[in-house]
Image (tube, rainbow, N blue to C red):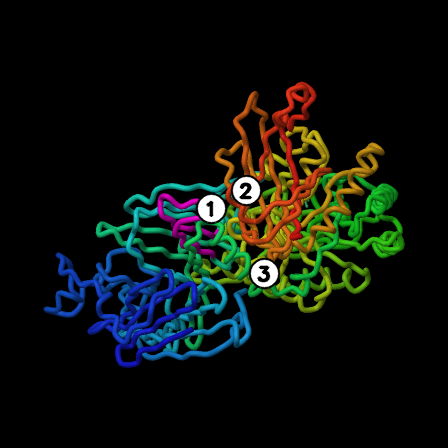
């Protein structure tokens, strides 16, 4: 997979789906990219790919006009080498300048890969992944740079991570270190990104790339509801099923930047990494700074190809939990069922009623600790609320388990409220400047998780409960952003480290919990989807996708999220109507059919259901269990319907023997055009039993792809049936199951 042409110092990372070629440039010793895209042949000599137009520009080596790096596609551009585009690395040197020149030193190749502490990263066995490390050294300092590339055998995936080591005696100030830099010739590309806000996360945006810089980023201390650490570029005609796409994801949960720069010679520079905004790292003698790993995916098969590559990589090589391939229990979460308004009896009643519905795991959400009866206090006091739970948590859990249910518990470990013993003993343990205003968010402060001592204190509180109470599932939440980054623990020159150190502390806590309690299923959450990113996926195989549980809004949120993240990671629950976020009423069937395409559960009060609804839910859970493996393991397709009023999803088992199709109509139209839904991913020559409600038919894969499922709501050619026909109506859905005959 990794070919090295020693004489030309050229590296070709290659598998059956992707090629990535770069070399050491003559005269300058910098790394020059020659090609990235679909697999190409390997050649003894790649000189024909060199682009060396002489243009007006500054030349790095006197009298050598060809050493104008402004026009060279590079792997790790830096400032001070005649390249005027944004650099991938910036260091302030002792003289106050930031002039670097990193020159090639050597390389190393090895098989198999593990995450390098302290960051999450992809991993794989020796027969699955190969790693190339390229070593560079700065001409003017003792800084050494390692670019670590990985190529996965079965996937169109290259990853890259950057390490900066200080082998000298003095300290340096690192201002910016991109994880990935790719310079590509532009092809009139569009770019895609996922944007939103609380309760409307991950809406997909697509725009033409214009000249100059465009970026998505976060300055909030979390990857955020606002932008996701992902971007893709694609040819203008690209659809779900065809066209060239490059997708990029950063395995990181803090302040990130994903940037595109289109220059005046039609080169695109793509960079992903920690956001340089307010970032500064004092790199002391002997220390190494590790950047997050970035993933680059290539697809010639449109967005579905990109999606499936991300999903396969994350499912097989990123999620480390023992739960990654295990069917998840169908849960009922108490949040929308009771919010803060419960006591022991109510919880036991809800749990008992859930069990009768077929629920497998009961989750006690916020409100069980300290004196918490609203969102105004008690965070950081992780002992049971004795008023609500007078017999204690252990007894409550014993009774719930005696019902035959598993038990899950909510924590928000990173936060503290000002009414707690923890805050009162250590007011300086929060993030913020003690002499300046420190804002509250949801009435709470952010603990300075950059300080390992504070992480230990919180871990010990959680550990005590986990040792005493048999807990099967943890929901780990985070409900506010960092607005005044300052740590009382750090020196003035280190204040630019606060946000990154904070996220390292979060990872350390998750790592300790995952190691000490490997049997516990962890679902991470950040006010819904404010940290739905590949970094959190490393520790938690599922993430709460959004606080919005409305089936119609979820169609948009889940479709956007599915661009990058597998269905097996997307928490999706059926909740009550009118919906608590948008007051919309949709049928129980519609809510179920949307929530099916994720990690399925409920978030409602079962005591408030009618007998008919209870029976419906019993059936829903049975139905989900039958499809669960297919949904968790299958290949996901967003099907083309031609408009945004109608949405269709499909998941096909890896052996193509079965598939599930969800079709959703937002608003009904009078006298609609005839609807045909073309399926994907089936075996052309195989015949499938097509099962929908009470109707069954047999069709060949080829025909289901070319003709499609006929979805007309009109009478089927029999005039008398016209007036009695059943129409889907507003907010409606259909579910079709296909099984190879
Ligand atoms: C935000 C989460 O996203 C919700 O699901 C719920 O756990 C609340 N926090 C509890 O405060």
Under tag 2, what secondary structure? Answer: loop
Foreground residue among 297 and 431: 297
> Residue 242 colored magenta?
yes
Graded by Cα atoms within 10 Å as few (under 14), some (14 to 19) or many (20 or more), the crowding at tag 1 reads some
Residue 501 at x, y percent in the picture: 52, 61
Residue at disc 3, secondary structure: helix
In the figure, residue 489 lies in which quadrant?
bottom right
Discs 1/2, front: 1
Q: Which of the two residues, 117 or 499, is positioned nearer the viewer here?
A: 117
Residue 240, label in figure: 1
Instruction: Give the residue displayed 41% in from the left and 62% down from the top.
Output: 179
Mark 2 lies on residue: 201
Reading the image, the residue beneath label 3 is: 315
SS for tag 1? Answer: loop
Q: Residue at x 22, y 63 (%)?
A: 69
Asked whether 562 or 281 is in front, the reply is 562
Q: In the displayed structure, would residue 583 be above or below residue 442? A: above
Mark 3: few, some, or many residues within 10 Å (few <14, many ≥20)? many
Residue labelled 1 has its Cβ within 8 Å of some atom of ligand 1: no
Residue 370, above or below 506: above
């Amino acid at each position: 997979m990794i070919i090295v042409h020693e004489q030309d110092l050229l590296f070709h990372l290659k598998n059956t789906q992707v090629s990535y070629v770069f070399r050491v440039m003559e005269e300058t010793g910098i790394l020059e990219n020659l090609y990235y895209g679909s697999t190409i042949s390997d050649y003894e000599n790649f000189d024909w790919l060199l682009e060396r137009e002489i243009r007006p520009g500054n030349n790095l080596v006197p009298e050598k006009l060809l050493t104008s790096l402004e026009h060279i596609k590079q792997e790790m551009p830096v400032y001070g080498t005649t390249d005027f585009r944004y650099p991938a690395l910036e260091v302030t040197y002792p003289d106050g300048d930031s002039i670097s020149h990193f020159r090639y030193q050597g390389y190393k190749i090895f098989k198999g890969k593990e995450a390098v502490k302290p960051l999450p990263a992809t991993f794989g066995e020796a027969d699955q992944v190969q790693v190339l490390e390229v070593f560079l050294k700065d001409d003017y300092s003792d800084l050494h740079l390692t670019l670590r590339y990985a190529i996965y055998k079965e996937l169109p995936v290259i990853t890259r991570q950057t390490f900066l080591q200080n082998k000298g005696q003095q300290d340096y100030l690192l201002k910016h270190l991109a994880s990935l830099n790719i310079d590509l010739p532009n092809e009139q590309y569009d770019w895609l990104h996922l944007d939103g806000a609380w309760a409307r996360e991950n809406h997909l945006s697509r725009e033409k790339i214009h000249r100059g810089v465009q970026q998505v980023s976060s300055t909030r201390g979390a990857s955020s509801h606002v932008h996701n650490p992902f971007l893709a570029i694609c040819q203008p005609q690209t659809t779900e099923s065809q066209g060239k796409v490059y997708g990029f994801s950063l395995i990181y949960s803090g302040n990130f930047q994903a940037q595109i720069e289109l220059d005046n010679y039609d080169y695109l520079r793509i960079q992903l990494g920690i956001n340089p905004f307010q970032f500064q790292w004092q790199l002391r003698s002997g220390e190494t700074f590790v950047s997050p790993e970035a993933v680059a995916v290539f697809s010639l098969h449109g967005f579905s190809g990109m999606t499936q590559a991300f999903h396969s990589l994350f499912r097989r090589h990123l999620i480390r939990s023992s739960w990654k391939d295990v069917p998840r229990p169908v849960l009922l979460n108490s949040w929308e069922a009771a919010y803060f308004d419960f006591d022991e009896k109510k919880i036991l009643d809800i749990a008992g009623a859930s069990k009768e519905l077929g629920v497998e795991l009961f989750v006690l959400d916020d409100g069980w600790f300290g004196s918490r009866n609203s969102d105004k206090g008690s965070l950081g006091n992780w002992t049971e609320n004795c008023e609500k739970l007078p017999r204690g948590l252990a007894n409550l859990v014993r009774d719930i388990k005696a019902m035959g249910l598993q038990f899950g518990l909510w924590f928000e470990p990173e936060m503290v409220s000002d009414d707690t013993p923890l805050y009162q003993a250590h007011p300086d343990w929060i993030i913020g400047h003690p002499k300046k205003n420190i804002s509250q968010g949801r009435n709470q402060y952010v603990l300075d998780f950059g300080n390992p001592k504070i992480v230990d204190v919180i871990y010990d509180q959680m550990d005590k409960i986990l040792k005493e109470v048999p807990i099967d599932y943890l929901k780990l939440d985070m409900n506010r952003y960092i607005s005044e980054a300052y740590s009382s623990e750090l020196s003035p020159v280190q204040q630019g480290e606060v946000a990154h150190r904070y996220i390292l502390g979060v990872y350390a806590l998750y790592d300790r919990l995952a190691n000490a309690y490997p049997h516990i299923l962890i679902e991470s959450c950040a006010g819904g989807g404010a940290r739905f990113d590949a970094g959190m996926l490393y520790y938690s195989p599922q993430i709460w996708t959004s606080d919005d549980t409305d089936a119609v809004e979820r169609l948009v949120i889940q479709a956007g999220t599915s661009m990058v993240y597998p269905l097996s990671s997307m928490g999706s629950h059926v909740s009550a109507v009118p919906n608590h976020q948008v007051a919309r009423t949709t049928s129980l069937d519609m809510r179920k059919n949307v929530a099916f395409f994720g990690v399925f559960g409920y978030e409602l009060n079962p005591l408030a259901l009618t007998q008919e609804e209870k029976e419906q839910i019993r059936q829903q859970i049975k139905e989900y269990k039958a499809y669960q493996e297919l949904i968790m393991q299958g290949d996901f397709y967003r099907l083309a319907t031609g408009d945004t009023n109608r949405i269709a999803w499909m998941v096909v088992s890896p052996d193509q023997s079965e598939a599930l199709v969800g079709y959703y109509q937002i608003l009904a139209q009078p006298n609609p055009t005839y609807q045909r839904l073309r399926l994907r991913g089936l075996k052309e020559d195989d015949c499938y039993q097509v099962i929908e409600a009470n109707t069954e038919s047999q069709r060949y894969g080829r025909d289901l792809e070319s003709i499609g499922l006929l979805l007309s709501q009109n009478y089927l050619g029999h005039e008398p049936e016209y007036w009695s026909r059943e129409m889907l109506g507003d907010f409606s859905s259909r579910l079709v199951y296909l099984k190879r005959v």
